[in-house]
Image: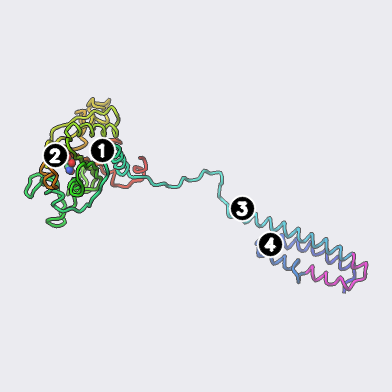
Amino acid sequence: MSKGPALVAELEGLVGECAARLDQALTLEDLEAIRVEFLGRKGRLAGLMGQLPGLDADGRRDAGRAANTVKQSLTGLYDARLAALSRAASDAALAGFDPTVPGLAPFGGSLHPVTLVTAEICKAFSELGFTIVTGPEIETDYYNFEALNMPPEHPARDMQDTLYITDNVVLRTHTSPLQIRTMLAQKPPVAVVAPGKVYRRDSDLTHTPMFHQIEGLLVDAGVSMADLRGTLTAFVRRIFGPRTNVRFRPSFFPFTEPSAEVDISCVLCGGKGATEAGTCRVCKGTGFVEILGCGMVDPNVFDAVGYDTERYTGFAFGMGVERVTMLKYGIGDLRMFFENDVRFLSQF
Ligand code: DAH
């Protein structure tokens, strides 16, 4: 058994030995092993302290003091090394990470321009008192053609390159069947707009097999062409600005009589027909661009839905949403709408 001074020397020797071992420790596991070896309940410090009871009183006092000091030193060394290793570990995890670099904005989706313009058009009409209705994209011949004053063999059917599912069932070629569905479901007064997809067997630079239309229908006692003109003029100025001029040109549609096409003053040249670059490429020098078809509901259509043609008159209109969107935003190529290029789509 050691005498007092010998035990003190042994105790003090632990400090240097432990410090050297801690310097070598590279991982938290190494560190824990060293802690157990020196400071653990059955460790080397505890072992030496176990010898205290065998000493005389002076020896016990000196060695006891030394043991306390050594324990503090060992604990301090261990804590310092633990802090250093922890810091090194987090530095390593963050190596190459510069916390001052600005973050990347998360990618946020945006609404498709056709969706946006559809919503804008519907809002303009709903503020004028119209309600919004929708209907099926797969239609029967009756709703798509016959009730709209296009009986079988009617030449106007050729104007619409129809996609047939069966002889009697088609992909709707326009939103006009919503006129029929609405009038069969409710009595006048009626004021509705109907947005939706329509389909035609047509595909080139300026036509796609699917596109979007918005139909409008207003029926009541005493509705005149002046109401049509006033309503559509108000609408056009809401969408294209208060200085837009509107021109009604006689036209033909089977379901309206009389019928008209509506032109607006050119969105690019403002109606002058020319820009600094020469003849205006949007209106081809005419100063106007066509935006929709319209007319007074043909009495044959009222007959088909059982409306009293002596009491009621009405107007209808239909427009292509892609076309309105192209004019509104100056988009020159219809294909942009269908390519799903987010650099294009996120600009609206
Ligand atoms: N349905 C026609 C088309 O697809 C557009 C149209 C013209 C609708 C005149 C109407 C209208 O309601 O009155 O070409």
Type of the residue with mark 4: Ala
Dominant secondary structure of the residues highlighted in magenta in the image = helix
The circle drawn on residue 91 is 3
Mark sitting earlier along the chain (3/2): 3
Q: Is residue 336 above or below residue 39?
A: above
Using a 10 Å C-alpha cutoff, classify the residue at mark 1 as few (fewer than 14 neighbours), some (14 to 19) or many (20 or more): many
Amino acid bearing label 1: Val
Is 168 above or below relative to 122?
Answer: below
**Residue 241 falls within the magenta-colored stretch:** no
Foreground disc of the pair 1, 4: 1
Q: Quadrant of residue 299?
A: top left
Residue 158 makes an appearance in the image: no
Mark 1 or mark 3: name the one nearer the start of the chain.
3
Residue drawn at 28 percent across, 47 percent down = 338
Element assignment for label 4: loop
Residue lying at 69% horizontally and 58% vertically, measured from the top left = 82
